[in-house]
Image (cartoon, grey):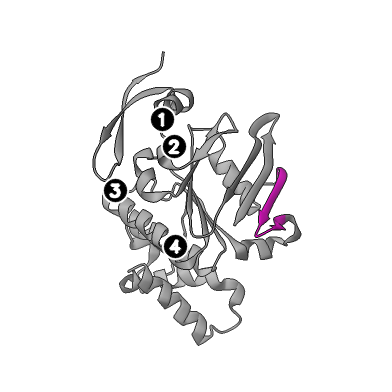
Amino acid sequence: MIKIENVSYSYDKNQILDDISFNASNGEVTAIIGSNGTGKSTLLKNICGILNGKGNIFLDGVNTETYSRKELAKKISYLSQFNSIDSDINVFEVVLLGRIDNLGMTVPRGEIEKVWEILRFLNVDHLAPKNISHLSGGQRQIVFIGQALAREPEVLLLDEPTNNLDMQYTYKILNTIRTLTKHKNFTTLMVLHDLNLLESTADRVIVLHHGKLYSEGTSREILTTEMFRDVYKMNVKFYPIDMGRNIMVPVSPCE
């Protein structure tokens, strides 16, 4: 479990995060939502140590400040929304880079098998010899998720992992993330843009507004007309689809 306690961050006298506190449990996907510029990506970067604001972050009761950067990188794996590799390497090698702290001059057989296990689990083992630059956007994103998983993290941080992907790959990636989180029993925090995906993806939802924690709970507790008016400045209508789930349709901006 990861505990965020009174985390604040400012840049050039602008308060980006203001006293954020919440918990995220093992085996659960916690989605972070909010309008653009409200601090979602900044929060993830503070959790993984890329940025250093005020407050405390505890991983299974241990303050992450006690870990070195290398130790923290093993425990918390961060995947930004902008991922690219310019090198001429194949899919297998990209995922193997996630095991770099375990490698020496040669690659042990056990490390090779761990990479194959991840590729098979993600159903991309057939892509192993292909150059990463030759893959589609969705395929590359799955491979980068594989690299993040290769570190065997306790916490997985994902910043809009389905950004600019089509419907098929959006479903495949989110379903893979949810399945892996349950199967491996780690904690996933994910910034998500499409709010209609929350009910099928997230166990818990954190709403940020102007750098503050606006609310938290399940998607059904969070997704209210009041929240959309306050946070997104939009009027929405809810339409039932199946199994008690609703789809949200923007109607008009709030005056």
Residue 63 colored magenta? yes
Label 4 CA crowd tier, 10 Å (few <14, some 14–19, many 20+)? some
The type of residue carrying mark 1 is Thr
* Residue 17 visible from this viewpoint: yes
Drawn side of residue 63 relative to residue 194, left or right: right
Q: Residue 43 sits in which quadrant?
A: top right
Secondary structure, mark 1, is loop
Give yes or no for contact between labels 3 and 4 (Cβ–Cβ under 8 Å).
no
Secondary structure, mark 2, is helix
Residue 246's x, y, as percent?
A: 30, 37
Q: Is the magenta region chiefly helix, strand or loop?
A: strand
Drawn side of residue 188 relative to residue 57, left or right: left
Can you name the residue that lies furthest to the left here?
Answer: 241
Q: Residue 64 sits in which quadrant?
A: bottom right
The Cα–Cα distance between marks 4 and 2, rounded to whole angstroms, is 22 Å
Mark number, residue 224: 1
Give the answer, above or below, for where 197 lies relative to 36: below
| Residue at numbered disc 3 | 166
Label 3 CA crowd tier, 10 Å (few <14, some 14–19, many 20+)? few
| Residue at numbered disc 2 | 221
Secondary structure, mark 3, is loop
Name which residue lies at 49% across and 34% down: 34
Reading the chain from its start, which is encountered first: label 2 or label 3?
3
Secondary structure, mark 4, is helix
| Residue at numbered disc 4 | 182
Residue in front for this viewpoint, 97 or 47: 47
The type of residue carrying mark 4 is Lys
The type of residue carrying mark 3 is Asp
Give yes or no for contact between labels 1 and 3 (Cβ–Cβ under 8 Å).
no
Give the answer, above or below, for where 217 lies relative to 121: above
